[in-house]
Amino acid sequence: MDADIGANRSDFRRCCLFNTAVSGLAPGQTYTFRWTIDGQSPCPPSTDDVVIKIDPLSVGGTTAGATTICAGTNSGTVALSGQVGNVIRWESSVNGTTWNSIASTATSISYSNLSSTTRYRAVVQSGVCATDYSTETIITVNQKVTAAAAGPIKPYAM
């Protein structure tokens, strides 16, 4: 059995089975299929609708905002673009191996008062699809220079 659904064409493998398979569905679309079982006369038919939503694959996107700052008082923003799905959290890491969760679902995140180089990335999920990570943005932190102590002024004869 074939079913035309708008510009998309769907194919049912075995339409009369309760566990049939359907193919040709497009990501980002929602489909409603109606199953009808004809009753014996004089009983009316029984119908039931099944709604299927096809989520597009998650795409983590690209972060921007890499910069070099001085340790101590500093601030900035890392922004996300090009993602497919919703931001479910941000993560930060000082070593690129161990990641700490940041409870934010916004498409940008602010940082302040960093004392060491820190990487940021977003975790994105489209519907029920697996999560995907964005690119990483690195905020390089340079340590403050220690004040020089040259000592007291000494006279110098020429």
Image (tube, helix red, strand yellow):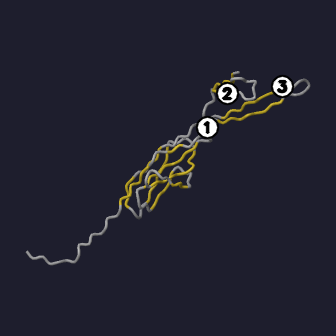
Q: Is residue 69 left or right of residue 126?
A: left
Q: Where is residue 67 shown, x and y percent of the image?
A: 39, 53
Report the residue that reaches farthest toward the top.
1
Q: Is residue 134 left or right of residue 26?
A: left
Badge 3 amino acid: Asp
Badge 2 amino acid: Val
Mark 1, Cα crowd under 10 Å, few <14 / some 14-19 / many 20+, is some
Q: How many numbered circles are shown?
A: 3
For the residues marked 3 and 2, what is the alpha-carbon distance in whole angstroms? Answer: 22 Å
Report the residue that reaches farthest toward the front.
97
Q: Residue at x 64, y 27 (%)?
A: 23
**Closer to us: 29 or 72:** 72
Badge 1 amino acid: Asp
Mark 2 and mark 1 lie on one chain; the one further toward the N terminus is 2
Q: Which mark is residue 2?
A: none
Q: Secondary structure at mark 1?
A: loop
Q: Is residue 6 left or right of residue 134?
A: right
Question: Which image quarter holds the C terminus?
Answer: bottom left
Q: Residue at x 53, y 47 (%)?
A: 123
Q: Where is residue 127 shown, x and y percent of the image?
A: 62, 42
Instruction: Say if 64 sits above or below 13 in the image.
Output: below
Q: Residue at x 76, y 24 (%)?
A: 16
Q: Where is residue 111 shown, x and y percent of the image?
A: 47, 58
Question: Which image quarter holds the N terminus?
Answer: top right
> Can you identify the residue that label 3 sits on?
38
Mark 3 and mark 2 lie on one chain; the one further toward the N terminus is 2
Instruction: Say if 108 sits above or below 143 in the image.
Output: above
**Closer to us: 24 or 14:** 14
For the residues marked 1 and 3, what is the alpha-carbon distance in whole angstroms? Answer: 33 Å
> Can you identify the residue that label 2 sits on?
22
Q: Secondary structure at mark 2?
A: strand
Q: Secondary structure at mark 3?
A: loop
